[in-house]
């Protein structure tokens, strides 16, 4: 990791020296004049990832709670395996699904009523043409559900059995036991699972590239096209003709590398805090 970090710094150094901190806040991306700024890409990456979390976390945590606390024994294995299989689907297949299934569904069934009720908000203003930040957020949500669900499930399995028994002995219902005894004990680990999902969403490339629209501009509306750091690298690296253009793409890679490493490190620490450094599910 240190070698990778140093290589990124060395390759990005011309852009770092030429643009400084302004690279992170400028919206200009002009290969003709060799002037570059990554603000729209950083914004698009963060917004699509946060939107994915808002959609994925309730579903993923709900699946984890159901499988650990409510599902019959014969059901846990098959459903858990089916959810985890989502992680095995190639990113490009998700992208194709997004183009041929998700975008038409959004255009026909989701966006019209959404704009009719919430169109006065900046988040849902503008003309929806298909490729958008909303589509990128939804497809990312589907992709990170298995990661969050799997880790959250392991965290819940690591909760000591006496936590559950104590709550039930005091007269709590099964759901009250989960809400008052299990979830508070595993809060840090579930948070770690969510942050781990965020790290996965930040670095996703192909599926986002195929549905986000790839427009280098800042827009508050989720219905407008956007851009992400990973998509920019995938789209432009083979077309970069100047040393500064290549250095700017390397600097985008450096920013993305630092963001994902920090997010994943925080997630691992939070999960470690709950499991105590032992494989989750090995207790009780």
Image (cartoon, rainbow, N blue to C red):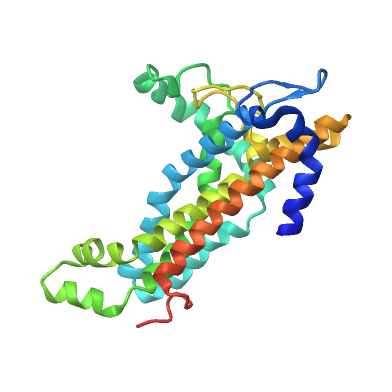
Whether residue 260 appears in this view of the structure is yes
Report which quarter residue 133 is drawn in: top right
Q: Nearer the viewer, residue 95 or 148?
A: 148
Above or below 119: residue 57: below
User: Residue visible at 64% across and 27% down?
Assistant: 22
The spot of residue 34 in percent (x, y) is 81, 23
User: Residue visible at 51% across and 63% down?
Assistant: 268
Q: Is residue 163 left or right of residue 188?
A: left
Q: Is residue 76 left or right of residue 34?
A: left
The spot of residue 265 in percent (x, y) is 54, 58
Q: Is residue 215 left or right of residue 154?
A: right
Q: Is residue 143 left or right of residue 172?
A: right
Farthest residue to the left: give it: 171
* Count of residue discs: 0
Report which quarter residue 168 is drawn in: bottom left
User: Residue visible at 64% across and 23% down?
Assistant: 26
The C terminus - image quarter: bottom left
Whether residue 235 appears in this view of the structure is no
Q: Nearer the viewer, residue 229 or 252?
A: 252
Report which quarter residue 211 is drawn in: top right
The spot of residue 197 in percent (x, y) is 51, 53
Above or below 93: residue 216: above
Above or below 231: residue 260: below
User: Residue visible at 42% across and 42% down?
Assistant: 54
The N terminus - image quarter: bottom right
């Amino acid at each position: 990791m240190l070698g990778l970090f140093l290589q990124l710094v060395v390759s990005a150094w011309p852009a770092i020296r030429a643009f400084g901190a302004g690279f992170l806040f400028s919206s200009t991306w002009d290969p003709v004049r060799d002037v570059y700024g990554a603000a729209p890409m950083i914004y698009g990456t963060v917004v699509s990832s946060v939107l994915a979390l808002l959609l994925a976390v309730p579903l993923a945590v709900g699946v984890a709670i159901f499988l650990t606390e409510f599902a019959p024994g014969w059901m846990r294995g098959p459903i858990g395996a089916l959810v985890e299989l989502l992680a095995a689907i190639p990113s490009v297949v998700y992208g194709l699904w997004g183009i041929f299934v998700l975008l038409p569904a959004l255009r026909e069934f989701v966006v019209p009523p959404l704009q009719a009720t919430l169109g006065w908000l900046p988040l849902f203003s503008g003309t929806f043409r298909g490729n958008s930040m909303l589509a990128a957020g939804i497809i990312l949500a589907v992709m990170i559900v298995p990661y969050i669900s799997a880790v959250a499930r392991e965290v819940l399995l690591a909760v000591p059995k006496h936590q559950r028994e104590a709550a039930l002995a005091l007269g709590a219902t099964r759901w009250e036991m989960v809400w008052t005894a299990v979830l508070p004990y595993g809060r840090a680990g579930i948070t770690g699972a969510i942050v781990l999902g965020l790290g996965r969403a930040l670095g996703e490339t192909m599926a986002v590239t195929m549905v986000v629209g790839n427009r280098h501009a800042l827009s508050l509306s989720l219905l407008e096209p956007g851009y992400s750091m990973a998509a920019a690298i995938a789209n432009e690296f083979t077309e970069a003709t100047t040393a500064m253009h290549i250095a700017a793409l390397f600097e985008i890679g450096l920013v993305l590398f630092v963001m994902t490493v920090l997010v994943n490190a925080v997630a691992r620490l939070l999960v470690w805090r709950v499991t105590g450094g032992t494989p989750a599910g090995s207790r009780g």
